[in-house]
Image: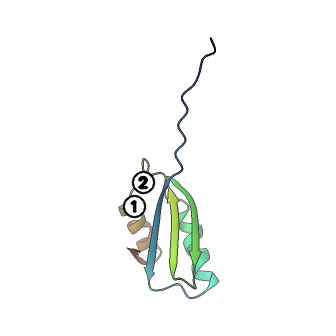
Amino acid sequence: MANRRNISFRMGDTLKITTTPVMHCEGCENKIKKNIRFVKGTKSIATSVTEQTVTIVYDGRKTKYEDYVEAFKKIGYDIEKK
């Protein structure tokens, strides 16, 4: 009988936020992406100046909302869940 491994794959938690001050250009988006990617557990970051949102997919076992609050503060933004 063949051995079977139980492999669990976690897609990640999703956090959708708005920033204060608002993003107004590509430079703002790049600043966020370049810095927030270093928060432990971050898998992907998508920004939208048009919608004024940042969507982060992350591993909830490695980080929490408060970690993102602190990371955004370091680069001059406050965040709020959308």
Q: Which residue is mark 2?
A: 63
Amino acid at dot 1: Asp
> Quick one: SS at disc 1?
helix
Q: Nearer the viewer, residue 37 or 57?
A: 57
Instruction: Choose top left, top right, bottom left or bottom right for residue 28.
Output: bottom right
Say above or below: 2 vs 77: above
User: Residue lying furthest bottom in this view?
Assistant: 24
Residue 25, position in %: x, y? 61, 86
Residue 82, position in %: x, y? 41, 74
- Left or right? Give the position of 72 relative to 37: left
User: Residue lying furthest left in this view?
Assistant: 66
| Residue at 45% from the left image edge and 86% from the top image edge | 21
Q: Which residue is mark 1?
A: 67
How many C-alpha atoms fall within 10 Å of the one at disc 2: few (<14), some, or many (≥20)?
Answer: some
Say above or below: 6 vs 9: above
> Quick one: SS at disc 2?
loop
Say above or below: 68 vs 63: below
Marks 2,1: beta carbons within 8 A = yes
| Residue at 43% from the left image edge and 52% from the top image edge | 60
Q: How is the image coloured?
A: rainbow
Instruction: Choose top left, top right, bottom left or bottom right for residue 20.
Output: bottom left
- Left or right? Give the position of 47 relative to 60: right
How many C-alpha atoms fall within 10 Å of the one at disc 1: few (<14), some, or many (≥20)?
Answer: some
Instruction: Choose top left, top right, bottom left or bottom right for residue 46.
Output: bottom right
Amino acid at dot 2: Thr
| Residue at 51% from the left image edge and 73% from the top image edge | 54
- Gap in angstroms between the C-alphas marked 2 and 1: 6 Å
